[in-house]
Amino acid sequence: MTKGLMDLRRKSMQTQDEVIAAVKKAAEELGKVPTLDWLLKYQKVSEYAVKKHFGHFRNCLDAAGLKHNRQGCELKDKELFMDWASVVRVLGKVPSMAEYTAHGRYSRQPLHRRFGSWLNLPGEMLEYARKEGLGEEWKDVLEIVARHLHAAIESGRTTTRSSGTPFQPRILKDEPFFGPPMVKNYLLLLQPTNEQEVVFLFGGMAGKLGFAMLKIRTEFPDGIALREVAQGKWQLVKIEFEHESRNFLLHKHDPEGAHVIVCWKNNWPDCPLEVIELSSLVGKLLESP
């Protein structure tokens, strides 16, 4: 039997008292209640031993006299952000999953559970830092993340431009065929009549307007984007989409919560926010190369 297998077997054969002792020692070293992910990552206990002796990790914490919350001692968002951001600062770039596993304090599972897929993580972390007012303390990290997101967006644009249609459309056998539209750009054939069509139209114009979208969501504000404000300089911008700008008032939105209103028609002359009226731009932008 190899040394590695022997070590693994010994670790899985931990007694109940050994598991409790390992958890207590980890709590003393960390200055807080450890997570199961952290204990497994640094091989303080085995998952087999925890399940065998306690059934669930929260029962193990109870046996060790440590308090846990209802979520099973989950890490707080700020703890996850600070650990991930620290790895970005050390590496000078956004880490891959393997790089974070090698350099981070925690495993990647809590990040997956809290922020979604690994590809979405940089944008989620950037939004979290802005929302929590961490921009000054982590300015260098946020600049690295912003550059990473911009590069990813530009890479996607290049791939699409060079390869044409990225997939073969499926022909629907029960639907009729039509001739091609008689307009040069057929992003949206008819003028928008609702907010969803404004969002769709803006999606096709965003790049030409200097925006790189990070997120479209169902809560206020509707969109989070990076905006090129000077050559090589991008800033985070919060966007609210409306069919008419004055609908912002009807929906009782807080002007402090957004930077820009994107609408089809601007009918709010005294609007305190910047308004981008697509009806006055669509002709020039969609006809341009």
Image (cartoon, rainbow, N blue to C red):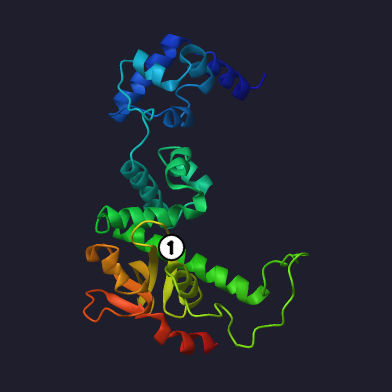
Quadrant in which the C terminus appears: bottom right
Side of 39 relative to 183 (left or right): left
In this view of the protein, can residue 163 be seen by the observer? yes
Q: Where is residue 129 in the image (x, y as percent from the top left)?
A: 31, 54
Residue 152 placement (x, y as % from top left): 51, 65
- Name above or below for residue 276 compared with residue 113: below
Q: Picture quarter containing residue 21?
A: top left
Binning the other alpha carbons within 10 Å of mark 1 as few (below 14), some (14 to 19) or many (20 upward) gives: many
Q: Residue at x 40, y 49 (%)?
A: 87
Q: 117 or 105, which lies in front?
A: 117
Horizontally, residue 189 falls left or right of residue 64, namely right
Please state the horizontal and vertical placement of residue 285, each as a whole percent of the image. Answer: 48, 86
Residue 107 x %, y %: 46, 37
Position of the N terminus by quadrant? top right
Instruction: Name the residue at the right extreme.
Output: 173
- For disc 1, the marked residue is 214
The correct choice, above or below, for 73 with respect to 10 in the image is below
**Residue drawn at (48%, 80%), measured in percent from left and top?**
191
Residue located at (61% from left, 76% from top)? 161
> Which residue is rendered at x = 38% and y = 30% of the image?
71
In the image, 42: left or right of 1?
Answer: left
